[in-house]
Image (spheres, rainbow, N blue to C red):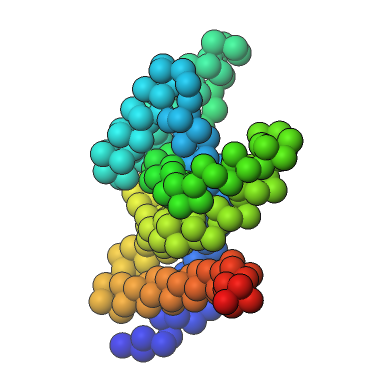
Amino acid sequence: MDWLGLLAFGDTGWGDELLYGLGITLGLSLATFPIAILLSFLIHWAKASKHRPVRIAAHAYTTVFKTLPEILTLLILYYQSQAVVNWLTGWIVPGSSLSVSPFLAGLIALSLVISAYGSEVVRAALNAIGKGQTEAAQSLGLSPFNTFRKVILPQLWRHAIPGFGNLWVILLKDTSLVSIIALSDLVHVATLAINTTREPFFFYLVIGAIYIVLVVLSTRLQKTLEQRASKGITRMEVSDA
């Protein structure tokens, strides 16, 4: 078997399909991650709210999405959101219907799951900073918004990068779940290739190697960001010594 020929581009190989699947995997990850980070902050603030119903709702949110298997969350959201959209469009325009794309369903499901864990990353990072920074900024007359933007946020990222970096790696791997709803990611394309060529070992090895490269590159990027975030702190400690 000409294994290298299986990776050729064009009609003779699966190289272009795998490249397309890689693009879908990366696109879904890059679209999901910023939304998940934003939701992580919102959920943490909801947990710290002075209003008890808001706190209860936020804790219920994290409990549900941390407890349910990711694949079950994806299936429920995909099929149930389709039913809700059809009901709404049928109510607004009788006889009409809209379909929810697998990409959008995957984005929503993964954002909800990752943000449930991300809220704990935000909580740990804020605890590492301490309340003294906020009290000092407020004593200088800074508004809560400017206190967070100018004082807390620059310090928060230094503590949050390792946690969010780990969640990014988890997100990269969890995108493989969307293959079950027929989104043409790496796993879905590899499955099609296997069904056609009957070479499961080769294609699983190929996509496994791709995921390893993605994780290694992500880990290196995370370490670079950590070093840059800590550079100013390290210099200050050296100068103070």
Q: Quadrant of residue 7?
A: bottom left
- Horizontal arrangement in the rendering, residue 196 relative to residue 93 (left or right): left
Q: Position of residue 125 (x, y in %)?
A: 47, 51
| Viewer-nearest residue: 164 or 188 | 164
Farthest residue, direction right: 141
Which residue: 54% across, 60% down?
A: 158
Q: Quadrant of residue 27?
A: bottom right
Which residue: 63% across, 55% down?
A: 154
| Viewer-nearest residue: 36 or 212 | 36
Q: Position of residue 124 (x, y in %)?
A: 42, 49
| Viewer-nearest residue: 91 or 161 | 161
Where, quadrant-wise, is the N terminus in this rendering? bottom left
Residue 133, relative to residue 54: is it above or below? below
Which residue: 31% across, 72% down?
A: 204
Q: Position of residue 92 (x, y in %)?
A: 59, 12
Q: Is residue 231 visible?
A: no
| Viewer-nearest residue: 39 or 103 | 39
Residue 217, relative to residue 27: is it above or below? below
Where, quadrant-wise, is the C terminus in this rendering? bottom right
- Horizontal arrangement in the rendering, residue 237 relative to residue 55 (left or right): right
Image label count: 0
Which residue: 32% across, 45% down?
A: 70
Q: Position of residue 66 (x, y in %)?
A: 31, 41
Residue 198, relative to residue 35: is it above or below? below
